[in-house]
Image: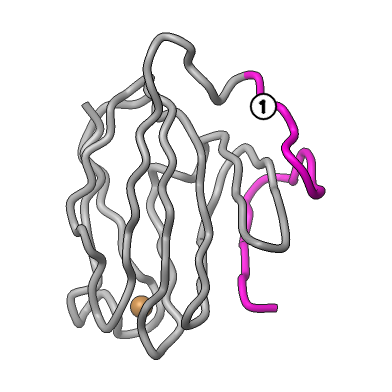
Amino acid sequence: MRLTFILIATIALMGLGSAASPDSRSPAASPTTIEVEMGEFRFRPAVIHLEAGRYTTLQFVNRGQLAHQVETVAFRRLPMTIVDPQSHIETSGLEILRLQPGAAATLRFTPRVRGRFRFACTIEGHQEAGMTGVLEVR
Ligand SMILES: [Cu+2]
């Protein structure tokens, strides 16, 4: 398996196709899509600007030679949909998203809490080498 999810909450729904997620889309605001590239040892962009209340798609792509992951307190209790080529997962929170080299996964969610949230690749030594960033939610 090329993609590992570690979820703190029970997966509410799992399967192929596009299940409706009634709480994830805000009809008032147009969606935002941002691609975040992972590599040795950085995220690009390292500062990600999000708008509270706006439905957002973050696509993580690992273009490095090593596995990388992203971990942030901002995702721990945030309902989201996780999509990769093999799966479509709805969860009430995400602890860690790990991607093998060449892998990609998309997170869809609506941020609710404003603030600056640090994120990092928490594989040993990676954040120490500079693999960190900030989610700015306004
Ligand atoms: Cu890493």
Quadrant of the image for the C terminus?
top left
Residue 17 image offset from top left, x and y in percent? 77, 43
Rendered-image quarter of ligand 1? bottom left
Q: How is the image coloured?
A: one colour
* Image-based side of 27 in relation to 53, left or right: right
* Residue that label 1 marks: 21
Q: Residue at x 60, y 41 (%)?
A: 81
Query: Looking at the picture, does residue 68 appear above or below residue 9?
Result: below
Question: Which residue is farthest top?
Answer: 28
In the image, residue 3 lies in the stretch drawn in magenta: yes
Q: Is residue 14 magenta?
A: yes
Q: Could you say which is closer to the camera, residue 68 or residue 113?
A: 68
Secondary-structure class at tag 1: loop
- Residue at 37% across / 16% down in the picture? 29
Image quadrant where one finds the N terminus: bottom right
Provide the residue span drawn in magenta.
1-22
- Is 41 or 60 nearer to us in this picture? 60
List x then y, in percent, for residue 134. 21, 51
Q: Which residue is located at x 52 percent, y 37 percent?
A: 77
Q: Residue 132 lies in what quarter of the image? A: bottom left
Q: Can you say whether 1 is above or below 26 in the image?
A: below
Residue 107 is situated, as x and y percent measured from the top left of the image, at 50, 47
